[in-house]
Image (cartoon, coloured by chain):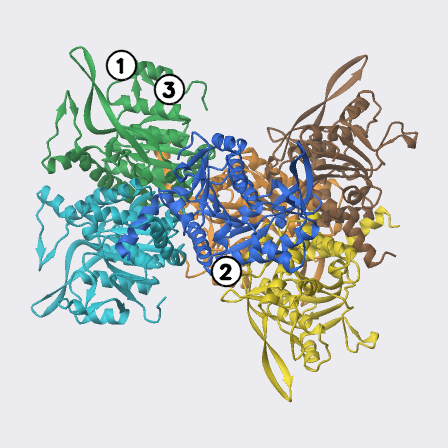
Chain colours: A orange, B brown, C yellow, D blue, E green, F cyan
Amino acid sequence: MINSVEKADVLIEALPYMQKFAGKTIVIKYGGNAMINDELKRNVIKDIILMQCVGMRPVVVHGGGPEITEMLRQMGKKSEFVSGLRVTDAETVSVAEMVLVGKTNTAIVNLLNQHGARAVGLNGKDADLIVAAKHLAKVFENGQTREVDIGYVGDVTKINSNILRVLLDNNYIPVIAPIGVGLKGETYNINADYVAGEIAAAMGAEKLLLITDVEGIYRDYQDKSTFISTLSVYEAEQMIREKQIDGGMIPKVEACLRALAGGAAKTHIIDGRVPHSLLIEVFTDKGIGTEVVRPMRRD
Amino acid sequence: MINSVEKADVLIEALPYMQKFAGKTIVIKYGGNAMINDELKRNVIKDIILMQCVGMRPVVVHGGGPEITEMLRQMGKKSEFVSGLRVTDAETVSVAEMVLVGKTNTAIVNLLNQHGARAVGLNGKDADLIVAAKHLAKVFENGQTREVDIGYVGDVTKINSNILRVLLDNNYIPVIAPIGVGLKGETYNINADYVAGEIAAAMGAEKLLLITDVEGIYRDYQDKSTFISTLSVYEAEQMIREKQIDGGMIPKVEACLRALAGGAAKTHIIDGRVPHSLLIEVFTDKGIGTEVVRPMRRD
Amino acid sequence: MINSVEKADVLIEALPYMQKFAGKTIVIKYGGNAMINDELKRNVIKDIILMQCVGMRPVVVHGGGPEITEMLRQMGKKSEFVSGLRVTDAETVSVAEMVLVGKTNTAIVNLLNQHGARAVGLNGKDADLIVAAKHLAKVFENGQTREVDIGYVGDVTKINSNILRVLLDNNYIPVIAPIGVGLKGETYNINADYVAGEIAAAMGAEKLLLITDVEGIYRDYQDKSTFISTLSVYEAEQMIREKQIDGGMIPKVEACLRALAGGAAKTHIIDGRVPHSLLIEVFTDKGIGTEVVRPMRRD
Amino acid sequence: MINSVEKADVLIEALPYMQKFAGKTIVIKYGGNAMINDELKRNVIKDIILMQCVGMRPVVVHGGGPEITEMLRQMGKKSEFVSGLRVTDAETVSVAEMVLVGKTNTAIVNLLNQHGARAVGLNGKDADLIVAAKHLAKVFENGQTREVDIGYVGDVTKINSNILRVLLDNNYIPVIAPIGVGLKGETYNINADYVAGEIAAAMGAEKLLLITDVEGIYRDYQDKSTFISTLSVYEAEQMIREKQIDGGMIPKVEACLRALAGGAAKTHIIDGRVPHSLLIEVFTDKGIGTEVVRPMRRD
Amino acid sequence: MINSVEKADVLIEALPYMQKFAGKTIVIKYGGNAMINDELKRNVIKDIILMQCVGMRPVVVHGGGPEITEMLRQMGKKSEFVSGLRVTDAETVSVAEMVLVGKTNTAIVNLLNQHGARAVGLNGKDADLIVAAKHLAKVFENGQTREVDIGYVGDVTKINSNILRVLLDNNYIPVIAPIGVGLKGETYNINADYVAGEIAAAMGAEKLLLITDVEGIYRDYQDKSTFISTLSVYEAEQMIREKQIDGGMIPKVEACLRALAGGAAKTHIIDGRVPHSLLIEVFTDKGIGTEVVRPMRRD
Amino acid sequence: MINSVEKADVLIEALPYMQKFAGKTIVIKYGGNAMINDELKRNVIKDIILMQCVGMRPVVVHGGGPEITEMLRQMGKKSEFVSGLRVTDAETVSVAEMVLVGKTNTAIVNLLNQHGARAVGLNGKDADLIVAAKHLAKVFENGQTREVDIGYVGDVTKINSNILRVLLDNNYIPVIAPIGVGLKGETYNINADYVAGEIAAAMGAEKLLLITDVEGIYRDYQDKSTFISTLSVYEAEQMIREKQIDGGMIPKVEACLRALAGGAAKTHIIDGRVPHSLLIEVFTDKGIGTEVVRPMRRD
């Protein structure tokens, strides 16, 4: 049992971090178990609100996960695959949008507000926040790489961040669903990691925090002793090239690289299964997970 | 064919209305055929953008319509009825929210932005915009009135309009889905007419414009000669009491009464089947449809 | 007879132009028949107010015309000429100032305000808006060019535009009489076309609109088929050099060139005898009259 | 010869007045000899600029004087009189406007700017500053009082002071010609004393300073020992009623009464023939001329 | 040893208090052991900075203590007493001012800034912050009460709080030495508790926190079981009247009463010997010490 | 005896200087006789307030003088000297701080406020205004120069001027005691001339005015005819190098050079024994004392 004086000590220990990050934008990619487990969910929500209370400007980007699959199943919609890639046809992207915007996003906004925040849900169509173009998947078959049209999967081509600044300046927390809009108004489903990376770049964020379901990055996943606390952008690029980083982690590391290239200060891949991993990363010296950083900058 | 000079004359004819309504808030309830027919839809979208261009502050509230029913059908969800009233259970309200927020709302926002506006979608959970409580339906059975719990159907209890002002002040057009949030975070489906009426009241709107699929109100629907151009609040209350206004029109007239009681200046029930009925109402002397007004105020 | 729906169509047709020019400064040189004919006068006045209503920032510069001559006549003042140029002595410039500022300017301001605008009259002495120096006329006689002092005729040397910004930011329409002030406080009469060009340059105007009494510029005035819709600055300079542009049109074309060199985006010489020629130019695709533009810029 | 130390002493003596009047509006009615004599003119101009330099907000209202008469003479216009009152027909008021706005006003503005101020000329038509209605003169003839229409002579019915505040907030000195505008746009000539009184009332001025060509008010003009330094509003009203105040002084005293009734703090009738009488009144204990004040307020 | 997760829990526990007090003014009377013991001193400093970091607006008022006595001793100045009261002659008040402003105040400001704050020292002379008048001590002798002049000891007569608002709005922490200034510029030493109470009243503070060297208030000091957690203003007034509150505590309780009467929301007498007692009071449910409150308000 | 008209003339003579210096920052080093003699003191105080009244932004830096010595004497503190330099040990610097901040500074602030200003006292610790580092004195002994640690005497290393701008923007007059703060929070006594020079540089002051007890600088002090009115920075540097400027004057001239190098426009060494020498310098053509200026700039 922690007594009052010890509690005060803990608050005081967090003081230098409050002083350091006051007024800075923090982009949080929210996903994985932390979006499913009720206890973890409440933790993340409170962590975000606390960040705002001590003067940071949090921006939340969330993914979708199993809810889209479940809805497709309920609607009797079967997924097609081309060379192992799910094809996102018009109906599928419409369901994805409906679930991400009308269910996942409203639930996060609601939870934040129930805990005293003033959150506002957004998707890429709001004020043209996320402009996107069709992503052409590369398939390697019969010794050749060719591009495959897998439908309404998009790449971010532009972030119109003004609406974010208006909301942050008025003390609202923006919560963003990863739906993009094409130049002709078409809807695109976009990987939320990439959206978070682009938002962090466009906002010149102080931090990009990607919540995952692993401890971070290992040189060799089999060997827990090879855990990497800090990864320079050069090492990260090399590990991707040499396929030392596996499938699910690639978009996360690429999002970090994109954010850093666009002007974000630091990026972190953190373990959402640890309670309050956001706060631990932001408010303690320990850090948690793997940070990807530009070399020469250790602040 | 209208020539250039005639076109200029038309613009000049609209000038007094531009001068009169500059800086005023106009709440538009968007629904009916004007949301389905592609031609009418584009008209309404352009009408709204034009209002903003000439200095008005439009706020759009939309309903849902057949899309919710269709989605429930696709999901194999059967509707229960109690004494003729559809019961909105937890799953149904979730589908309604998903469709209204993630499909209908995003489509309207998208269409506005494709035509050059900067629209932002909202629902009642965003910044707690629409706080609601359970609506208790009154059922008359066996000579007695009793209240029936028909689930997650809500009445507006509070509008937190600050987010609307922030968006309007920054030249965004707010587009609102009629989803309310309860004090414990529960989701409520609310009749969009009532939401529009409450928003108009909370904003002290200059006008509430309810787009319908009829010409307006008649004393006797059989007799087209009994069309009512202007209805005072007293007459309107009387007609409701005396059941001269039928089912579908009741929420519209009540929304007008609520808006007027809360401070809105004028309210109009207009025919969405007439192309550009919004502009005709706002920018010409003719008017269109039925206006419900406080007596003593003819401006 | 144009019906309501057609009227709405006309308004909607103007929408893209409203969107394009919102917030932009439009300098209008007001003169010629449009200042004399009552019908045309009312048209111009309403056109200007409509521009402001839809978010543009109009600035009006007017000329003088026959009222000065009439006043000189009434006062029994005879005009002297040197080599065909009217000499503007101290008394003449004083009469010009009196008529331009105290009669022409107040009448335009009054007319604008009677139609619902909030206009404010200015001349070059107000806040030292138009600083000027003596213009030395060049006379070609006996095979030689020499400079002739024709009195208080001025060239603009500096525009102090701050007062214009203050008025525009507060939604006033500035109306400017073409009187300049010398460094020692002396009064100069300046060609209103040049003043308009300099004001457009100093304000970085989106458009300079010069209202004239002709259709525009012809390569050959005799041959109506040689009408020029668009003239590049290079062509315009060449036509002046080669004397293809005649007397009265020279100051207009030079005003356009000056405005473009100083940063104005586009310039137009339009026919004030066509009703609402201002609106037709600004709000329709047709355009009207001759535009003088920088090459490479066709927006 | 005053040495440097004595000069500093004089500045220091003015300090309490600077502290007292900083940020306060001072309305100055400029007229009489001080507008004709070059030396006195320069003095008044510098006095006004100095007031602004030390933080006051001066507003200048000027009259017309002999220039209008001279212009009418030059134009061969004869004045008609009805029972001793000059009839101001349409032509006469047009000449008055032209001279007041285009000659007297521009000259004062110019002089202020030549001495380093940023002055802006206004008349009642600018932003509808001075709204007026026809003044009906009362004529006593054959034992009866009747109202006579003497043409375009006006009474102030409303001051739209917003343009004054905009200019003062941006450090411009407004200089106002006493031309009023009727509801239908007609031009009225108004006594400048009354205009100054109304402006002082509308602005809640700290002081109204009326520059005249006499020392102030005497109980008995023959007896210089009866000079009145301070007159209460009650005494002033009584003196007017009992005709102890003669013709030319009546509008001045009535302007004071009007200013005080409307909220101005103090009013002064001062002798413009004394060099720098404005400064002496404002910056020294001596005061000068006659002040008209509300009783109970001696600050 | 507290682990990271527990630390995060502690931060989250503080969240509701951060939300509740954001933007609120907190006046802290700093004194006693917490000003002498180095460890406690650092704690208080950090507690204050943390309050500011989470959005509160702390204002610090400090007392003097033993440093004044020591300085008087060093200077060989002997204190006179009249009926047991120390007489504060001109020299003594000058020493008090010098020590409070030039030593105690600068040391606190310095310590705050060394820990990352931006503090600014003030005393009652700065911008006439604390206007005071001579306090007349009441002495009871020979069965009679008489007033005794004990020199430059003052009562607060007015707080000019504008300088506090300017500093707080610009994120500076004001640190105030309890020196008052009389209407003729004379210096007064004032009890810091009273100054804090008056500042809290003038600022409409959310909390007044008085740091003392005791646990709080007891009904009976001998009996630790009679500790009072919450005291209503009526009880407090009664206890003073009935002399149940002893000497040193009287000014503290009176400061609370003064603050509450002037509009402060809550007041607390807390034990400065407990480390971080400020934070414990503000950020935990436990509370600490004795609160004096208006009845009816338990928030 | 100067009459009213002459007084007005003097005010008018000051007008061009008011116009020239409006909005400009003037740094005044206040010291010498002008701080001791009651008459001179009042003069300086009023001069400063008058500067503010006419729109300048005065910043006052004061020295200490005999009060520190007197206090050290009273406390029985003996001064040590190393090679003729007074050693400022921890106790001495503490006394200096106490006297400068708690006595000299409060007295000047009080005097300004008693005359109607709103002054605020500052020292280098407030908002870290003056960051300093230990000054190493250079001693020439036995044919060698060596550095000697003479304790807490500091050199300015940084000015954090934001607090000055906040106060000036809110119409407070900052009064600064020359105490600096080291990176570890240590206290430094700094020559007030240098502090004034650095403040003038950091603020880009229009003028640095150093009040001394001499007429200014002479080429040869014996020969009054060699008085220097204007000294270029090159001449000043040469005179210091060639030891033509003696001890007490060196810091003043160096402060001027520092201010000019940092962006101040002009610097003046003026005679504080002449009443109102500040005003005479600022408001008359005569000037007074010696100005040190950059060549090429004679404005």
| As drawn, B254 above or below D174 | above
Tell me, yes or no, if residue E76 can be seen here. Answer: yes
What is the CA distance from the residue labelled 2 to the residue labelled 1?
74 Å
Q: Circle 2 is placed at which residue position?
A: A236
C-alpha distance separating marks 1 and 3: 18 Å
The mark closer to the camera, 1 or 3, is: 1
> Could you tell me residue A87's position as x and y percent?
72, 53
Question: Which chain does the residue under circle 3 lie in?
Answer: E
Give the image quarter of residue A74. top right
Chain under disc 1: E
Residue A78 visible within the image: no
Q: Is residue C18 rendered to the left or right of residue A10?
A: right
Nearer the observer: mark 2 or 3; the answer is 3
Residue position marked by numbered label 3 in the rendering: E230
Contact check, label 2 and label 1, Cβ < 8 Å: no
- Measuring 45% from the left and 49% from the top, which residue is drawn there? D272
Residue C146: % across, % down: 59, 83
Residue drawn at x 80%, y 42% as measured from the top left: B285
What amino acid is labelled 2 in the image? Answer: Ala
Can you name the residue that lies furthest to the bottom here? C143
Describe residue C267's horizontal placement relative to residue B6 as left or right. Answer: left
In the rendering, which numbered label is found on residue E243? 1
